[in-house]
Image (spheres, grey):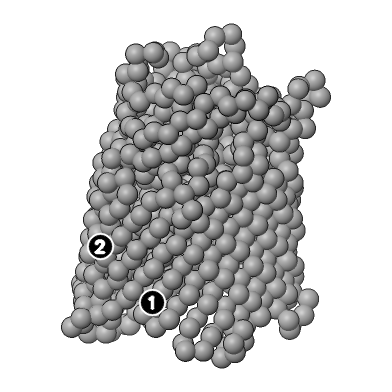
Amino acid sequence: MTMKFLPALLISGALAALFPAHLAAASVEETDSVSLDEIVVTAQSFKDVIPAQTLKGKELEILRSHSVADALRYFSGVQIKDYGGVGGIKTVNIRSMGTNQMGVYYNGIQLGNAQNGQVDLGKFSLENIESVELYNGQRSDIFQSAREFSSAGSIYLTTRFPRFREGRNANFHVALRAGSFDVFNPSVSFDYRISDALSVSFNGEWMTSSGKYKFRYRRVTPAGELAYDTTATRQNGDIDAVRFEGGIHGYLPRGRWKAYLYHYNSERGVPGAIVNNVWRRGERLWDRNSFAQGMLEYNITRRWETKVHLKYAFDYTRYVNNDDKLIRVDNTYKQKEAYISWANRFELLPNWDLSAAYDFQWNGLSEYMDVSRVSQWVSLATAFALGDCFKAQASVAGNFVNEEKLERDQAPFKSRFTPGVFLSYKPFRRPNLILRAFYKHSYRMPTFNDLYYTDMGNAYLKPEAAIQYNVGVTYDIDRPGRLFRYFSIVTDVYYNNVRDKIVAYPKGQQFRWTMLNLGKVDIRGVDAQVMAVFSLPARIDLTAKAQYTYQRAIDVTSPADNYYRHQIPYIPWHSGSAIVMLDWRTWHLNYSFIYTGERYNQQENIRYNYTQPWYTSDISLMKSFSVRGIAFKVTAEVNNLFSQDYDVILNYPMPKRNYRFGVSIDF
């Protein structure tokens, strides 16, 4: 049996299992007498083998005016590439593994981009997000899709779930934010409960900004002489974007389901790099991203739970470069994606679970390039626990890829298996001390751009593979009613070895490049997180959090290279962040600090390529009150409080001090 027929057989089996006769006959009326608290899908028992870094609740509310990329800066081990301004592209990687090694999941389904493998997290607002979770290795829940077992790390974005106060069937939320760079950002949300088993939700948002901000740019030669010192206004960073999304949430007597629609439409300028005191401003980018996805989770028996995800996505991108001093470009890309996942969890014993999953995905890229790719994932995983003292997980995932390109021979069939083992041990009942470790293989397929892009593609590229090792410890104390109410510390030491790293090399002319499997990177680091909560007199709550990361990520490709054993570009040795939150009745004060240490912007760690450390401080004040049962929140923010001059990426200056104000109404 060939792999081409495997999807049809498995999908048929999935549909047969998911729609037994008694489910097809169920109706909404049969669930009217069942409360939401009783309609709960079976909880998983092994979620804390490898803990997640999480932003939700009050912390996320304070960051609501920012994008997802801005929120992720407060996680340890994360590097953000930010090209500046409201409309600037923002990508993320974890522990120097590279942006393409990250899996970004929106309501449980991965956001795809087979064209270049990168997800611009600047497109995703926190306005409709309920939680942001970051996992190293993989999520500590074996009841997941097969694709999730293949990533080096994962980011999970979960949208708001409709919740209703007793006696109410509808929620309305209206918000308006405005501030520096001519930012104007209104949004609206609406939830409606049709019955105890069915509700709908909608969220819409408009963001517009000129993107103009003052900056000072100063460069000194390696000899210490001043090359230039510029004070100017950043241009071509404007954005006009609209986002709509909505969902239907349903409950069944033994399960739940959800259907979701998403649409994002934007036009933006692409702010160019400043080189030799000259900057380009002729680039424009249009994006239309739409997808429909659905989920059905159902307990077939007491020991067998199944879950199906479906998705269809269409992405349209137009890139124009009208700069007279560069090659003129006007390219249009249309990408389509169809995806289905079927996952099953079996309870073999009360403390032993087994899962099996199959995923199928088709990607097509047309217009500028005509390429299609069929990817299939299969996974097996098991989770075992001995009380609360020992927990273990093991998994293996296989990925099988067939790819075709117009006017080329069919690419060879590619396959790869990625095993992983995760352990957690609690030696004492008290204190709450947990030791953990994991070993994980991961890899990424070359993107369409890597393989086929004009003048640089290499159709014979191998997948980029990585091996991850991690040992860590967690300690926390919880003392309700005490002055020092809560304390926790989390520390991880890790080693990552990346092989066949996909890199671009020039081949003679400035705009002609070739893609090769030459890179090998040795990554060693430490992540540490500390959190403390105090209940002070006069009903004052104080929360303090800090994260620190040390990384040594060196190129070990060849001893003959000038940059052998040098730190790879843009990875700092030291970085960290801190947040202090002060709550008094209906007032909320928040201060946050982010630091990125010294690093180099090219492969050779020489003085000419040295990039200085940077840090920023942000402060915000929020007031909550109600008038005749209508809840109001007013927020004022000052970002880059001390007006630091810095750039995350060389020659892309970031904004100096800037302001933002917001008001929201719930009724």
**Where does label 2 land, which residue?**
175
Q: Under tag 2, what secondary structure?
A: strand
**Where does label 1 land, which residue?**
587
Which residue is painted at 63% across and 51% down in the image? 575
Which residue is painted at 36% across and 41% down in the image? 213
Which residue of the protein is positioned furthest toward the left in this rendering? 628
Q: Residues within 10 Å of mark 2 (few under 14, many from 20)?
A: some
Which residue of the protein is positioned furthest toward the top in this rendering? 508
Quarter of the rendering containing residue 425? bottom right
Using residue 397 as the reference point, say whether residue 592 is left or right of it: left
Which residue is painted at 66% across and 80% down in the image? 477
Instruction: Give the position of the C terminus as an image quadrant.
Output: bottom left
The disc, 1 or 2, on the residue closer to the chain's N-terminal end is: 2
Amino acid type at mark 1: Trp
Relative image position of residue 286 (x, y in whole percent): 30, 33
Q: Under tag 1, what secondary structure?
A: strand
